[in-house]
Image (spheres, grey):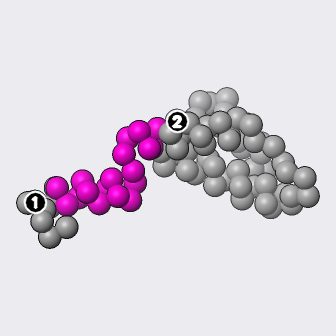
Amino acid sequence: MSQCASAKEMWDILEITYEGTTNVKRARKHALIQEYEMFRMLKGETIAGVQKRFTHIVNHLISLGKIFEREELQTLNLLTI
């Protein structure tokens, strides 16, 4: 990092290192969307475990820029009650 010519260059390197490239983010988002769409309660899983796992998926999708449609949000509200 000491070889960086500017703070911007250092920031770009840190961003890619910790968040990944655009392709990595796209792949991560695609995998999470697939996981979201196929979401089911696992055998022997508690309700708290289901909610925790579902919330984890949704929060990561939001952080990657996923925008949920109104119908999806209504479904999310029903699942988290």
Please say whether residue 47 is visible from this viewpoint: yes
Q: Which mark is residue 67?
A: 2
Task: Find residue 51 and report its horizontal and vertical position in percent.
Answer: 75, 55
Total count of labels: 2
Q: Which mark is residue 6?
A: 1
Q: Classify mark 2: residues with Cα within 10 Å, few (<14), some (14-19) or many (20+).
A: few
Task: Find residue 39 and report its horizontal and vertical position in percent.
Answer: 75, 42
Quarter of the image for residue 7 reads: bottom left
Quarter of the image for residue 23 reads: top left
Which residue does the image show at 36% across and 45% down from the upper left? 21
Q: Classify mark 1: residues with Cα within 10 Å, few (<14), some (14-19) or many (20+).
A: few
Quadrant holding the N terminus: bottom left
Residue 80 or residue 61, whichever sits in front = 61
Tell me the kind of residue under disc 1: Ser
The kind of secondary structure element at disc 1 is loop
Q: Label 1 vs label 2: CA separation?
A: 34 Å
Is 17 a magenta residue? Answer: yes
Label 1 vs 2, first from the N-terminus: 1
Is 4 a magenta residue? Answer: no
Which residue does the image show at 52% across and 44% down from the upper left? 28
Which residue does the image show at 46% across and 38% down from the upper left? 26
Task: Find residue 76 and report its horizontal and vertical position in percent.
Answer: 70, 42
Which residue does the image show at 55% across and 50% down from the upper left? 60
Q: Is residue 35 left or right of residue 31?
A: right
Q: Main secondary structure of the magenta part?
A: helix
The kind of secondary structure element at disc 2 is loop
The stretch in magenta equals 9-26
Tell me the kind of residue under disc 2: Ile
